[in-house]
Image (cartoon, rainbow, N blue to C red):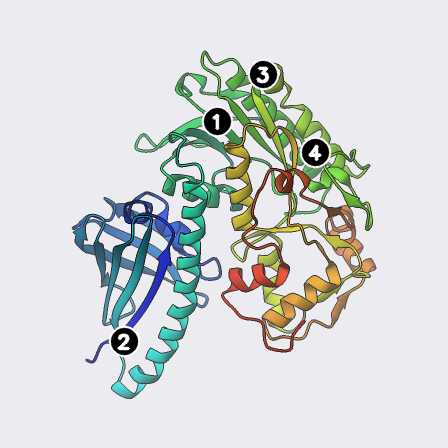
Amino acid sequence: MKKRIFSKRSTIDAPVEEVFNWHARPGSIERLSPPWDPLEVIERTGGIEKGAEVVLGMKAGPIPYKWHAKHIVFEENRCFADTQTKGPFSEWTHYHSFKAYGKTQSILEDKIEFALPFHPLGNMFAGRIIEKKLGRIFKYRHHTTIEDLKCHLSVKDNPPLTILVSGASGLIGRTLVSFLTTGGHRVVRLVRKTPDPKKDEVFWDPMSGVCEADRLDKIDAVIHLAGDNIGKGRWNRNKKKEIMDSRVKGTALVAETVSKLKNPPETFICASAIGYYGDRGDKILTEHDGPGFDFISKVCKKWEASAEPAVSKGIRTVFLRIGVVLSPSGGALEKMLVPFKLGLGGKTGHGSQYISWIGIDDVIGAVHHVLFNDTISGAVNIVSPEPVTNAVFAKKLGNILSRPAVCKIPEWAVALVFGEMGRELLLSGTRVHPGKLMETGYQFRHPGIQNVLSHLLGLQIKTGGL
């Protein structure tokens, strides 16, 4: 059966050794997985050396399947290759090539040889579809590689860190962990299950106040992200207590535990949210503005206050007031995609409420910026510099998906279905400015809504669109 060949080549502003090592470290598969078509590493033996194997969980539309691959070539700083041993293709071999380009640049080339298990005529047409899909995927992969390496190399004079992370299985946490490990850092995860002896895991239970402090030696920094999902379930009395307790008790436990260590970490980074400011209409809000009066405002205020043990110990403490995180792998955007793809998308309520959003890659980029910039402390707004109204967001998303976005969810329907949660999360407006990030020189990967949606969904906006 005749093979088809796909290739993608990019020039990267990084030495070839750095580019190769980035691919060789844990987390590279996850970082290279496009968020509109994510994969899961189910099992692996080894890394990218010859003979290493990996089993990936993937989907063809709604249908899940497993992809088994084995590495067959390995030449350090030059190339490695893997081939499908079990999966949907008749043949599939992926060659990753690296070549020095001067002293500070390198050329990365991905080449895939594949064949489909169809009649030659079907293979010809299906092959074109596969090549188009690969074009979207590898455009994303190369862009991610370039931007991640730029971020890591900006602090190359600093030694690798050992970082304690809570909430590592969440949307932000799992993305951040793979980003940090590809940068050469060691990540220790706080988990609520029995720790895996083969992994850097430490048990904790915020509700009972248990944390295995004896296993937290030589931690350089803490990134605390854990907290109950505020967008899941109606906000009845029990749910609101879970939201509050998970953040206040969890933060207090981690802050107290690390502050009592013989060698406490230098940095404590704690998640918070722009919900701190409450519903403030179109007023531009900075880190200097006080809290609102909504339920989530009260949660965020107590959440940040519960980190006091770390502050009192003299640990540099940062509160990440995170906006609406955009990723098709989870959160608000994931929930919006189905109705918008069906042509049922549109504004919520009057549509003039501001959405202070941020792409998932800029969340981790901002966390990295805060981690290595010891002049930053206190509250930091983690949002794009270009917030948009709900109505504009709906139009942009509809345009990217080539779907109309003229439906409207009335305010009464939001209040009826979601109650207090809907009023605070869907109908309120918060127009937040990332003052500290911009003042300290953070460069956004995707500052505009059109650009970030195109990147995250692997789609281009149609000519003549908004």
Question: Which residue matches tag 3?
Answer: 314
Question: Which residue matches tag 1?
Answer: 221
Question: Which residue matches tag 2?
Answer: 116
Estimate the x, y position of residue 230 in percent, counting from the top left: 65, 43
Say which of marks 2 and 3 sits in front: 3
Kind of residue at disc 1: Ala
Out of 344 and 147, give the one closest to the viewer: 147
Kind of residue at disc 3: Gly
Q: What quarter of the picture does the C terminus occupy?
A: bottom right
On residue 148, the disc is: none
Q: CA distance from mark 3 to mark 4?
A: 22 Å
The answer, for residue 109, to whether it is visible in the render is yes
- SS for callout 1: strand
- The numbered mark, 1 or 4, whose residue comes first in the sequence reads 1
Q: Is residue 340 left or right of residue 262?
A: right
Query: From what the image shows, is residue 97 above or below residue 90?
Result: above
Q: CA distance from mark 2 to mark 4?
A: 53 Å
- The numbered mark, 2 or 4, whose residue comes first in the sequence reads 2
Q: CA distance from mark 3 to mark 1?
A: 13 Å
